[in-house]
Each structure stands twice: as C-alpha cells, then as structure tokens.
Image (cartoon, rainbow, N blue to C red):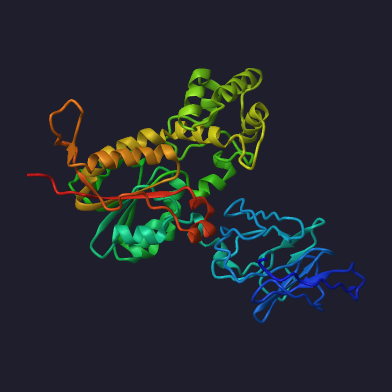
Amino acid sequence: MLFNPPTLTTETDRHGAAPFAVAQASAGMGFLFFFTQRAGLGTARRFVKNTDVRTAPGWLSARRLVTFMAGRSKFLGTELRSSFESMVRVAPGWLSARPSQMFPTSQIAALGTARSSAIPVGSCAASGWLSAQAPADFSEASDAGHYHLPVFPAEIAEWMEPSPGKFIIDGTLGGGGHSEIFLKSGATVLGVDRDPEALSHARARLAQFGERFSTWEGNFSRLKEIPAIQAGERADGLLLDLGVSSRQLDSAARGFSFMREGPLDMRMGPSSPHTAAEVVNQWDEADLVRIFFEFGEEPKARRIAGAIVRQRAVRPFETTLELAGCIEAAVGRHGRTHPATRAFQAIRMAVNEELESLATALAAAHAILKPGGRLLIITFHSLEDRMVKRFLRHRSAPFIDDPGWPEPRPNPDYQFQLLARKAITPTAEETTLNPRARSAKLRVARLLAPTP
C-alpha cells in the first residue's frame, strides 16, 4: 500500500453543522484529528507546515508534499483536464477538488487546499466534492510563464548549447519557454510564430531581455523570408517544437478541443488557408476519408466521413461539440480515449497544412544554419516523427546504395551529423509534471561544413 490507512473520527460542529472528518498528513497520508476552526465545507487552512482540510462525512482529505506546477502535475486520485482549469476526479473514497485557478509552482499544498488567509476561502460544494478557491494573493498562478510548459527543458539546453554571442531561432515560439532558456544562457533569440496572440504574450514575458529577443510573425515553413536570413545572417541553432501549444488547446474559442464548446476554427494563425468548418462542411467525402486515414491514422475513417456528410446535409456543423457528438454516435465509445481524438487531429493538420510546412522547413534548414549549427526538432505523433527521422537519416548518410549499383555512391544531400542516433524521450518525472509530454520525441543534428 502507498500509505497507512487513516482512522476517521467525527465530531458535531458546535454550531450545529453536520458531522465531519478532518485529515492531516505531513510525511505521508495519515492520521486524523479534530480541527476547531469554524469554516465552511471544503475550507483548507495552513497551520505551520501542515494543512487541515474539512470534508463532508465519509470523505478523506489528504496532503502530499508535492508541487502543483501550475496545475500540470498528475497525482493519485487526480485527472488533469486543463492547465488553466484543473478539474480533478477521484476513485471511491478519495477527495475531489476543483480549484478555481492554477496553483503556483512555488506552492506546496494539499489536493484541493488553499493558502491560509484572514478570510475563509473554502465554500460548500455538491455532495462528495470539495471546493477550493485560491485567494487573490496567488499572483504567481496567473504569471505569464504558465502560458505553456515547455517540453524537454533540460535536454534542449544541453543539446542546443546556448551561450553569449550565439544566435538561435525558435521557429515555434509558442509561450516562449524554450526561448527563455536560451536567453537566460546569454544567447540572442528570434522567436517565430504564426499566432499573433503567442507573439504578444512572448514579447511581454521576455521584455526583460531587451534587444536580445525579437519576434517575427509567420509560419516556420517561411524561415528563409526572415529579413536577417535574407540579409545573409545564419543561426547557431534552430528549434522546431511541432504541434499545438497548451494555450491553444485549452482555449475553447480556438476550436481545437472536442471537450469544450467552441467554433470549428482550429487555425494556429490568421494565415492558415482554411478553417475546420470549411473542411467539415465543404470537403468531399473522399477527401475527408483521406485526411482521417492519413493524418489521423483513423481505422474508422470511412464510417466517420460518411456520418459527417449525412449530418451536414441536414444542418452544417458549427461547433466542436456538434462534430464530436456526431463522431461518437457513428463509432461508439470504447475505453478512455475519446472517439473524436484522431479525427480532430487530422482536421487540425489539414487546416494548418502541418506536414507540408514541416517538409518545407526541413528542406530549408541547411540554409538557415551556419556550419556547426544545431537543429533540434520536437515531434508529438508518428507522422511528424517519421518524416523527421527519414529526413535526418538520409541527410546524415555520407553514401547511398542501391541493389543495382556496383558500389555505394556519395550522397549529394549529405549535410548533417546526427548527435543523438535515436530519438530522445521524456523522463518519467517530466511526464508526471507535464502529461502532454508523454508522446514527445526530440531529434538532434548538427550542420556540417560544405564540402569544398
């Protein structure tokens, strides 16, 4: 067992409230005692280093000495729903909590508890639920740094080797987490992103670094159009962190999520040629089958496409939940994965032309970097990783061979040296702190000097 079973005690509130139990845990999850502070159901208050939590009858309060990491940590009895809206679900006998905002990274507190305050911060909740509300002085919770938690922070710093005097292009700026790592090491960084909202956020977040940080709005497939590159400047490093940022996924208005009501948009930026509504409501059934099968690797592509075409003939799709409901009705729901997961991924990739952009960026990488420059690419699903793997394998082979040739021939595309022969995967600790990193892979290469 993970902890010693506690002994529940109940008392009747001197003010006539229903019986309740209070739990305290310091080193482990353990003994219970009566806490005399008058407060509402679900109130949590700090006492020295311990946290006392008032609960409903028959429910267990527990405290673990861990950090919430802006709502991204996943603990026993919890389920992460969003980096901004931590919906927590539990197994029978465990306490549930729904914080109203993120816990700061420096706060060590119990599941569903709030920092001590002169004003009680708890509130009554529905049966079996604890309501925990962070007080206004939790300023760190809304800090700009929580826009997006970067993956592979240690590995990126190690393989990129940022230092004073180096020029690094962050081709997928997002929340600016990776750029901040480079800037703190003294490097000069150009952040590239097609999302104006991400650029605005990053400028505010990284303003402290002054002229060493600048931005350029555009798709990473257009890196050769950057004025500095056109003027002949070359980078010491190029980072591509593919996929969608947490902020985009968690924003219902962006239309990426099948768990939240929002418009069928899915554009990463205003330059994207289509919206999800156009794809779903206007593309031919054969094209829908193709993208579901190729981009989403969806085995039920034909059934899903047929259901979409039939329903849109009655009424065009307008929201994400309408589309998700149609897909679920068509294929049913089995297991924990939502049946619309692959289809939504495929539509998003089609809307933003993600694979086409990646192919263009890979082909241009050698023209962006100076000899010895580092190319780091983070992927999140097999199609992207397969493309990157094949590209680097071919471009790092000095010779190529064919069964019909008498001997291997020099590879005219030989440009890179693989610094890590296999993809780097996240540690167990990182996936615990950031569950969205679990499918990430990092590949690293160095540009060779041109052959005379």
Seen in the picture, residue 339 relative to 287 is either above or below; the reply is below
The quadrant the N terminus occupies is bottom right
Q: Residue furthest left?
A: 452
Q: Position of residue 42 (x, y in %)?
A: 76, 65
> Which residue is depicted at the point 66% across and 76% down?
26
> Which residue is depicted at the point 81% across and 77% down?
34
Q: Position of residue 16 (x, y in %)?
A: 93, 71
> Which residue is depicted at the point 19% across and 33% down?
401
Q: Residue furthest right?
A: 16
Quarter location, residue 313:
top right
The quadrant the C terminus occupies is top left
Seen in the picture, residue 288 relative to 334 is either above or below; the reply is above
Q: Position of residue 148 (x, y in %)?
A: 49, 54
Q: Nearer the viewer, residue 271 or 79?
A: 79
Q: Position of residue 181 (x, y in %)?
A: 37, 62
Count the marks.
Answer: 0
Q: Nearer the viewer, residue 394 or 34?
A: 394
For the question of whether residue 225 can be seen, the reply is no
> Which residue is depicted at the point 72% across and 73% down?
30
Quarter location, residue 61:
bottom right
Seen in the picture, residue 356 relative to 226 is either above or below; the reply is above
Q: Nearer the viewer, residue 429 or 137?
A: 429
Q: Residue furthest bottom?
A: 48
Would you say 100 lies left or right of 289 here?
right
For the question of whether residue 241 can be seen, the reply is yes
Quarter location, residue 83:
bottom right
